[in-house]
Image: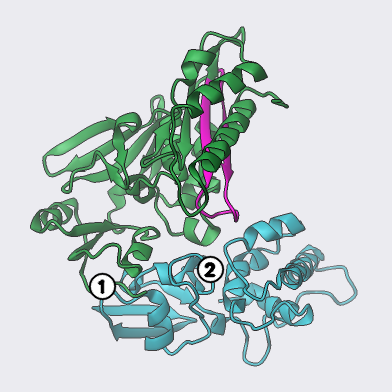
Chain colours: A cyan, B green
Amino acid sequence: MKTRIIANGTAYERDVEPRRLLSDFIRQDLGLTGTNIGCEHGVCGSCTVLLDGDPVRSCTTLAVQVDGQRVTTVEGLADGTELNGLQEAFKACHGLQCGFCTPGFLMTLLPIYNEAKRLTREEIREVISGNLCRCTGYQQIVEAVELALNEAAELAETPPEEGLGRVPQESESSRDGSP
Amino acid sequence: MKPPPFDYLRATSLDEVWDALDSDDDVKVIAGGQSLVPLLSLRFASPSLLVDITALDELGGISTDGDVLRVGALSRHVQVEKHPLILDRTPLLARAASWVAHAQIRNRGTFGGSVAHSDSAAEFPAALLALDATMIVRSRAGERRVRAADFFHAYFTTALTPTELLTAVEVPIARSGSSWGFEEFARRRGDYAIGGAAVYVERDPDDTCRVVRAGLLAAGPAPCLAPRLEDVLVGNVVDAGRINDAVRSAMARVNPGENVHGASEYRRDVIGEMLRRALASAFNLEEVA
């Protein structure tokens, strides 16, 4: 079946079998291999992508079901060589060990990061409860999320007229221009 | 871990759905697919055709109609969790939704899909039993209404026939003097329940219990009501002692069976404890010894 999606701003059209999982469509048909596949039945969260802006599991979605919709994968996060603030925070806090689960964590967290919400540690753990890290590196992941959300919230809370040059320029606030 | 081959049809009208359901016995309806796609990948299901109903706008929407709230089958879990009408008029349902799997799954899974799937460990069936909801079922022949207590039959089996579609659920709006409780236990937040309970209670102005119903999670082959609670609680001012008696009486009549999460006795203890806590919460009792 003809299936068209817009992935990270680029339009793709492919002919796929109805049984093709969105995760396989993204990796194999579109060549966007940043999205990882772990359990393949909706438990581990490694394959999380944004579908029309909301995090979903790409392994429990059929490609033909999302014809005409907008997908954002982890490749859509960085702006050229400039990492997204969430990615920076994961790097700064050692929030990844083997890195396999990281794309899923980042995509799960992206909408919350973009909203610049402050969360307690307990709330952070709740938000990431659908993503498994088999290195069990959760402590650093929670720290990375806390850092990223605090930075985003601080930036959002700074009144434009104050703050010694902290006026958020468009180039500075890449999180506002997320795909 | 890949689904078997099948044909796929994105229905643009209910007539197309009826034609598809009439065409073969092995036709399955798909909406969010959050239960069905894993079953396909595990090859527990191998339909000849999937009929996608997500383009049928008439199956969506959340609205009030007199003293009931109508929740369209295509409402996503996240909508049930956060919709102002549900939070205000039937908060137990919103609370149950917040326990359904993880955010990624709540963004995509549909309310009607979860109800029609009829997993005994799922939150919505238990809440709908407690709330005495009514299922709106349609086929080419017309519409029929089935009470929650008559809807869930056995393992993944409901009152739906192969040519019928669950289109909406009517949930009575919480009446004055009503309160509720919801408790669930799982190894990881968001995983299927090892045990749980959704409780709906109505009390008279003198605090006497008038109505009590509890839907149990993972207590048997099908979503079910906790048996005989009303014998112990209705007509009484409920205290910790009565709750303990009611839980003991109910648990003597359920048999959750052994599964990967534990032995039958363990699972009965977990369900009983969740029921005890949900009742205590519904009756505003801080501590139940």
Q: Where A164 sits versus B248, above or below? A: below
> The disc numbered 2 marks a residue on which chain?
A
Q: Position of residue B278 (x, y in %)?
A: 59, 32
> The disc numbered 1 marks a residue on which chain?
B
- Asked if residue B84 shows in the view, the reply is no
Query: What span is in magenta?
Result: B177-201
Horizontal relation, residue B78 to residue A115: left or right: left
Q: Where B117 sits versus A24, above or below? A: above
Give me the C-alpha separation between circle 2 and circle 1.
22 Å
Q: Are marks 2 and 1 in contact (CB under 8 Å)?
A: no
Name the residue: 42% across, 71% down: A59
Q: Which residue of the protein is positioned furthest toward the right in this rendering?
A: A164
**Residue B195 is one of the magenta-drawn residues:** yes
**Residue B98 is one of the magenta-drawn residues:** no
- Asked if residue A58 shows in the view, the reply is yes
Closer to us: B203 or A100: A100
Horizontal relation, residue B278 to residue B107: left or right: right
The circle drawn on residue A179 is none
Q: Position of residue B244 (x, y in %)?
A: 61, 22
Closer to us: A67 or A130: A130
Q: Amino acid at mark 1?
A: Pro
Main secondary structure along the magenta-highlighted residues: strand
Q: Position of residue A45 (x, y in %)?
A: 53, 69
- Disc 1 element: loop
Horizontal relation, residue B47 to residue B219: left or right: left
Residue under label 1: B4
Residue under label 2: A44
2 and 1 marks on the same chain: no
- Location of residue A75 by image quarter: bottom right
Horizontal relation, residue B74 to residue B189: left or right: left
